[in-house]
């Protein structure tokens, strides 16, 4: 018999070092005012040189496990969304499993869906639990995007930051995760990509740097994001026969305040019902939704029983949503 999954606990972590918009003003031609107006971002956090994606995920995971009241040994599935893995392999799920001291040989999945990584990971973990193949799933979104940002490119350097978020899923008699919706359109692959990879190879630029950086056509992505997120909101409501007024909280991907406002408008939602953290940590890709979710839960805005719509959008292009009864 199919079961349901629910979010038992969440956790998040931002590295200590902060880079403000004013700091960026000394790196290339930009201004705090331009960045705030166009994106809503005030600052971003950067991993320390010796901190990896798994290190950030480890702290977020410990916090999520504590909030869920479970021990690491109880975890029987890890799904880890990231675009900036520590290594090509082993996958970050395996590295996190080892770091958490889990010795049960539970499956650990590394998943790359760019900024939609957490939505994809959540959807997969939900299905394992529904099918009875997992009883305690650790779902992670974590990134060290600062390692693939071209710090000479002002169109991307202002946007991204490092961070991690995690959620523990447990089986439930009533739906916690009500539905998930995932999409990819690979025809948009050239709008947002990393310019180097193990199979295509890494070129060396004239400045001597290895060319493996985020490349983005921001204004085109902006248009597709607003359209796709509007459509997935409709799809999620229609799949559940719900009116938009039923949603208590929108927890959107934290990429750009103007994209967030457009999605809130589509839902006729006042911004007071939207969890916004983009000003605090910029776009942390796969970490962005769990970071915002954890913020809303820990500061007491999101309460047990609330109906929450999560959504994200990123390179691929990929996008996804989840309707959750918290
Ligand atoms: O998770 C998904 C990942 N990506 C996104 O969500 C990105 C979505 N897109 C965006 O957030 C916006 O497109 C940006 C914030 C990246 C850019 O804002 P925009 O309003 O779309 O600006 P634009 O790219 O159309 O550029 C407008 C102007 C250009 O100058 P000209 O050609 O009009 O003279 C740019 O050169 O702004 C200039 N510009 C900057 N100026 C100051 C670009 N970056 C900067 C900057 N500071 N950092």
Image (tube, grey):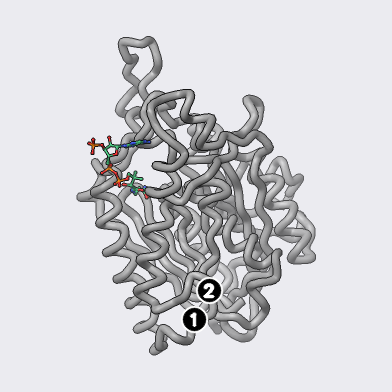
Q: Nearer the viewer, mark 2 or mark 1?
A: 2
Question: Within 8 Å: ligand 1 and the Cβ of disc 2?
Answer: no
Badge count: 2
**Left or right of 313 on screen, residue 80:** right
Residue 283 placed where, x, y %? 47, 47
Residues at circles 2 and 1 in contact by the CB criterion of under 8 Å: yes
Label 2 crowd bin: few (<14), some (14–19), many (20+), radius 10 Å: some
| Along the viewing direction, whichever of 22 and 302 lies nearer the viewer | 22
Q: Secondary structure at mark 1?
A: loop
Q: Height in image: 240 above or below 259?
A: below
Residue 46 placed where, x, y %? 59, 35
Q: Height in image: 89 above or below 304?
A: above
Residue 242 placed where, x, y %? 41, 88
**Left or right of 64 on screen, residue 307:** left
Residue 314 placed where, x, y %? 37, 51
Q: Which residue is mark 2?
A: 273
Distance between the Cα atoms at labels 2 and 1? 9 Å
| Along the viewing direction, whichever of 262 and 101 lies nearer the viewer | 262
Q: Which residue is at a point 31% across and 58% down the rendered structure image?
A: 225
Quarter placement of the C terminus = bottom right
Quarter placement of the N terminus = bottom right
Can residue 76 be seen at all in this image of the molecule?
yes
Q: Which residue is at a point 52% across and 33% down the rendered structure image?
A: 22
Q: Which residue is mark 1?
A: 247
Residue positioned most to the front: 33
Numbered tag placed on residue 268 in the rendering: none
| Quarter of the displayed picture in which ligand 1 can be seen | top left
Q: Which residue is at a point 57% across and 34% down the rendered structure image?
A: 19
Quarter residue 45 falls in: top right
Label 1 crowd bin: few (<14), some (14–19), many (20+), radius 10 Å: some
Can residue 127 be seen at all in this image of the molecule?
no
Q: Secondary structure at mark 2?
A: helix
């Amino acid at each position: 018999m199919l079961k349901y999954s629910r979010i038992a606990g969440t956790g998040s972590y931002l590295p200590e070092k902060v880079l403000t918009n004013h700091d960026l003003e000394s790196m290339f031609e930009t201004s705090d005012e331009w960045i705030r107006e166009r994106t809503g971002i005030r600052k971003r956090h950067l991993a320390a040189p010796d901190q990896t994606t798994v290190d950030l995920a480890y702290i977020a995971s410990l916090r999520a496990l504590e909030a869920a009241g479970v021990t690491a040994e109880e975890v029987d599935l890890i799904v880890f969304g990231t675009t900036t893995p520590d290594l090509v392999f082993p996958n970050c799920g395996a590295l996190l499993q080892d770091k958490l001291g889990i010795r049960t040989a539970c499956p650990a999945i590394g998943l790359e869906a760019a900024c939609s990584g957490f939505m994809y990971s959540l959807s997969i973990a939900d299905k394992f639990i529904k099918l009875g193949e997992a009883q305690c799933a650790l779902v992670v979104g974590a990134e060290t995007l600062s390692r693939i940002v071209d710090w000479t490119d002002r169109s991307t350097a202002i946007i991204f930051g490092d961070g991690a978020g995690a959620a523990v899923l447990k089986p439930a008699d009533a739906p916690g995760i009500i539905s998930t919706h995932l999409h990819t359109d690979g025809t948009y692959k050239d709008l947002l990509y990393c310019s180097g990879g193990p199979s295509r190879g890494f070129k060396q630029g004239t400045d001597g740097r290895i060319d493996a950086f985020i490349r983005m056509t921001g204004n085109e992505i902006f248009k597709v994001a607003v359209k796709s997120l509007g459509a997935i909101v409709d799809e999620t409501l229609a799949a559940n026969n719900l009116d938009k007024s039923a949603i208590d909280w929108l927890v959107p991907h934290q990429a750009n305040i103007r994209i967030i406002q457009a999605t809130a408008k589509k839902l006729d939602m006042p911004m007071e019902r939207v969890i916004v953290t983009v000003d605090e940590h910029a776009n942390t890709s796969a970490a962005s939704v769990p970071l915002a979710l954890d913020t809303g839960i820990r500061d007491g805005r999101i309460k047990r029983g609330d109906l929450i719509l999560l959504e994200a959008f990123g390179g691929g292009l990929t996008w996804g949503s989840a309707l959750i009864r918290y």
